[in-house]
Image (cartoon, rainbow, N blue to C red):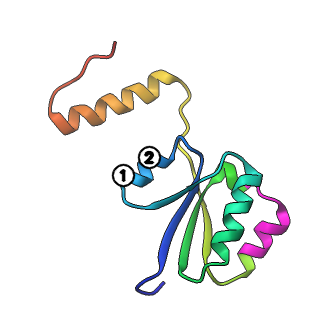
Amino acid sequence: MSEGDVVRVVCRPQLAPGFELAGVTVDVALDGPGAAEVLRRLAAEPKNGIVLVDDVLHRALPDELRARLERQPRPLVTPFPAPAWDEAAEAEAYVLEILRQAIGYRVRPR
């Protein structure tokens, strides 16, 4: 990657805010066909150096498109694992721990 290359993220709507808070440009897709449309557009833009794709969406891409993206040198398209919460309580505990570390006080759940 060289200076001026752009990093993009393609993900489902629930993951977008975290990347946006980190300052990364996000393209939201609801499903495989939506992600395929976004990836075709991003692959045609030479400024894109790396495109990170939510693994759920990546698995839903047509095989032909995945193979074509793997063969072309730019952008580097790579899946990333989305967070997996087994239960809502796990997600809530995680957020509460982040808050405790940030403010130094344990917040009680509702």
Measuring 29% from the left and 32% from the top, which residue is drawn there? 97
Instruction: Work out which residue is located at the far left of the displayed protein and give it.
Output: 104
- Dot 2 falls on a residue whose secondary structure is helix
- Name the foreground residue: 19 vs 28: 28
- Dot 1 falls on a residue whose secondary structure is helix
Measuring 16% from the left and 27% from the top, which residue is drawn there? 105
Expressed as whole percent of the image width and height from the top left, the position of residue 53 reads 61, 59
Quarter of the figure that contains the C terminus: top left
Measuring 72% from the left and 47% from the top, which residue is drawn there? 31
Identify the disc placed on residue 17.
Answer: 2
Q: Amino acid at mark 2?
A: Pro
Q: Is residue 57 above or below residue 70?
A: above
Instruction: Work out which residue is located at the far bottom of the displayed protein and give it.
Output: 2
- Name the foreground residue: 18 vs 91: 18
Q: Quadrant of residue 62?
A: bottom right
Magenta stretch: dominant secondary structure: helix
Q: Which residues are magenta?
A: 59-69
Label 1, on which residue?
A: 21
Measuring 49% from the left and 70% from the top, which residue is drawn there? 7
Expressed as whole percent of the image width and height from the top left, the position of residue 40 reads 71, 69
Expressed as whole percent of the image width and height from the top left, the position of residue 106 reads 21, 24
